[in-house]
Image (cartoon, helix red, strand yellow):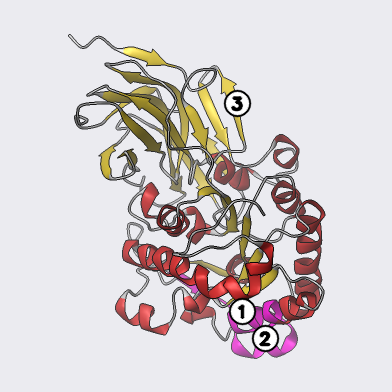
Amino acid sequence: MTQWVSTPVVGGPVRVLGAVEVEQTDAGVVLHRLPAPSRAQLPDAFVRMCEEQPSGVRLTLRTPARHLELDVRATRTRIVGHPVPPAGAYELVVDGGEVLRGTAEEHGVLDLDPGAGTTSGGTGPVTAVVFPELPPGDKDLEIWLPYGELTRVVAVRTDGPVSRATGSGGRPRWVHHGSSISQGASADAPTGIWPVVAARRAGVDLLNLGFSGNAVLDPFTARAIRDQPANLITLKLGINVVNHDCFRRRTFAPAVDGFLDTIREGHPTTPIVVISPILCPMVEDRPGPTSIDPASPPDAPVFRTSGRPEEVAEGKLSLGAIRTILADVVARRGVDDAYLTYLDGRELFGTAQWDAMPMPDLLHPDAAGHRHMGERFADLLPTLVPALQRAGAVRGSGAVAAGA
């Protein structure tokens, strides 16, 4: 029989990266991506669910063990009227290279009504995520958690001693905020979402504040970013504003200014890149709101917009209008802010990518699209050097250097 060593997630050699706070509960450890003051202001259960889904969160450790299991309580999210999604992947990265996968087969179900912002359901039982056999010898391990499941981590179990990983510290920190695409929607694995692809390619420590449906310039998010250590901050803004039809031309630019003002209170010279939306043809020249098309199959939903092109002239926002406003805000502020720059999201996913990798649901890139976006962003970082080099935060090969 295997002689297991059980290692707690809190108070031992296991290190948590990509989370702002860890909360010990009777059901296991909750890995939060927003701090307690922000969580106290969350407007509904939908945002709360997204905040607790551990996109970009990973556990690091070092061990000679050949076998590793992760005890968790997993809860899958089912949109009301749609089937329960398949199990999300847990990925075990060995010495930064080989990637092994496991899943939590026993799980709870959380029913989400995104329009009402309500959820109902329960946490799953304790279950073991079992990974394939590990190579021999001491090795650094990273356990990446599913981006779209609620995960309570109970313990790490190995058949060998555990110590702190040697290669996980000292990396420059990238804080990213965005929408469901940034959280991971339609990616095939936690290391396959575009910010993680970019972070691993660039060799940086990612804090992913991508929240599905909830990148809408909330002040509590700006304050959370303000209070986090960061060598680079990126803000991918716009698509959720259109999806919710929650700003007009009159109010959007001041809200962007206020969001940036708050962040600058804590990061006066940290490079900030404002990234506009990637290509999304259904709302390029017409506004939202967008929603799942009820005529689409429940197991293969697609999105639609109820906006009309003529409403843009009335002050509603299309993606085209959003990009113009964001570029104008950055250009105006850039006169006095040498550390602020703008990136058109179509540089990450534009017409050529849409033709080669069309979005299955008309809103989210597929797994190949995520990989392309992440690789493209990492490779674009050197092209941003002229705007950012005075901050001393960008070095070659798309990597972000410490010290900003």
Residue 309, magenta (yes or no): yes
Look at label 2 and name its amino acid: Glu
Look at label 1 and name its amino acid: Pro
Residue 9 position (above or below residue 191): above
Residue plotted at (22% across, 30% down): 134
The answer to whether any part of residue 294 appears in the image is: no
Mark with earlier residue (2, 3): 3
For mark 1, what is the residue? 287
For mark 3, what is the residue? 23
CB atoms at circles 1 and 2 under 8 Å apart?
A: yes
Residue 195 position (above or below residue 110): below
Circle number at residue 311: 2
Look at label 3 and name its amino acid: Glu
Residue interval drawn in magenta: 303-327
Secondary element at tag 2 = helix
Q: Nearer the viewer, residue 202 or 372?
A: 202
Q: Main secondary structure of the magenta part?
A: helix
